[in-house]
Amino acid sequence: MFEWAYDGVNASIPRNVGPECANYISLKQRIIETVFASVLIIYLLIWGYKRMKLPTKVSYEDHDRLGKRILLIIMTLVLGIEIGFKFTSRTVVYILNPCHITTVVQLYLLAADPSPTVTAIFRIHLNFLNGPLLAYLFPETESRRIFADKAMYYIQHGLMVVIPYYLLRIGGVYNVEPLSDISWSVFSYGLNLIYHFWILQIIALPIQVNLSHILCAAMLDPFGGPYYRLWTIVHQGLLCPLLSKLFSYASDFFLTKCQLTKVKPTLECVLPKKNKFNENAKSYEDASTSGNGHTHVN
């Protein structure tokens, strides 16, 4: 009854859909790998959750900005167009790919009122920036038959990097943990594995569509082979936190240190509005030296 959601998937693309991809590894191996991943998931979630801390001093003032509203409108339009293309091509199932989920999270971050929940979700979602990177390094646009559809692919993944940088520029609730703190990255990777092994795999197996390569290795996967999923757990477990920390470090440098792009004294400081820079800078410098120092990127 749900064939309308996936019967447009291009079967001519190798390892994209079909029994060959679904049988890339045996069912027994899938079960063993899923059990292993589940044990790892539980450990990562418990270890990370016990050590995660939210900042005790942060401004929850109104973060509404014209730039936020513009980005919200643009990303909403892009996602809407993406969904439209998926319906017309009968490939709605691809909406479940991780980058679309991350896009929805970013729309929430752009629209939500400031709160500790926003800070937590913002920190977690920074660990999913491997999606845009892999999308540009290994683009998969063969199934997108028209130029506009392919253009949306690149625009969406580009905006996925622009949005968190802009939110860090605003500061306040959009802040990051110290570079030495890996608890958020560990917890986030546990969520990443949950989505792939507990959700995408359950959906992908019966319809035999290779969602986020959970069924079989991509043709360009350098770790392709019967144990590609175990290799993926390892290299993405390194890449996800590394990208998150590099992104935070680079944002801190360009927003607070580089003379050409500097806009505020510290990364967690709320971007001051016109004629209020000195007042804001002083209040947040006092906060950042009060002994807490939790949100400062060193």
Image (tube, helix red, strand yellow):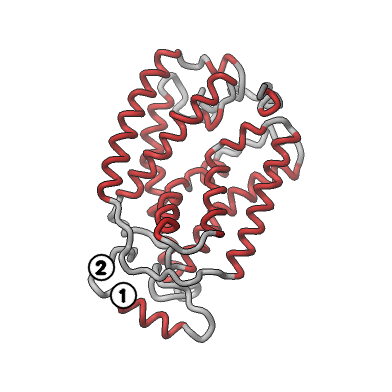
Q: Is 130 or 38 nearer to us in this picture?
A: 38
The residue carrying mark 2 is 292
281 shown above or below 237: below
114 shown above or below 123: below
Residue 138: x and y in percent read 56, 38
The residue carrying mark 1 is 287
Q: Secondary structure at mark 1?
A: helix
Is residue 18 rendered to the left or right of residue 252?
right
Q: Residue at x 41, y 50 (%)?
A: 124
The reply to whether the C-beta atoms of the residues labelled 1 and 2 are less than 8 Å apart is yes
Q: Amino acid at mark 1?
A: Ala
Residue 129: x and y in percent read 48, 48
Q: Amino acid at mark 2?
A: Asn
Q: Residue at x 41, y 38 (%)?
A: 236
Does residue 51 appear in the picture of this structure?
A: yes
Is residue 114 rendered to the left or right of residue 97?
left
Q: Residue at x 54, y 17 (%)?
A: 22
Residue 262: x and y in percent read 46, 74
Label 1 Cα crowd, 10 Å radius (few <14 / some 14-19 / many 20+): some
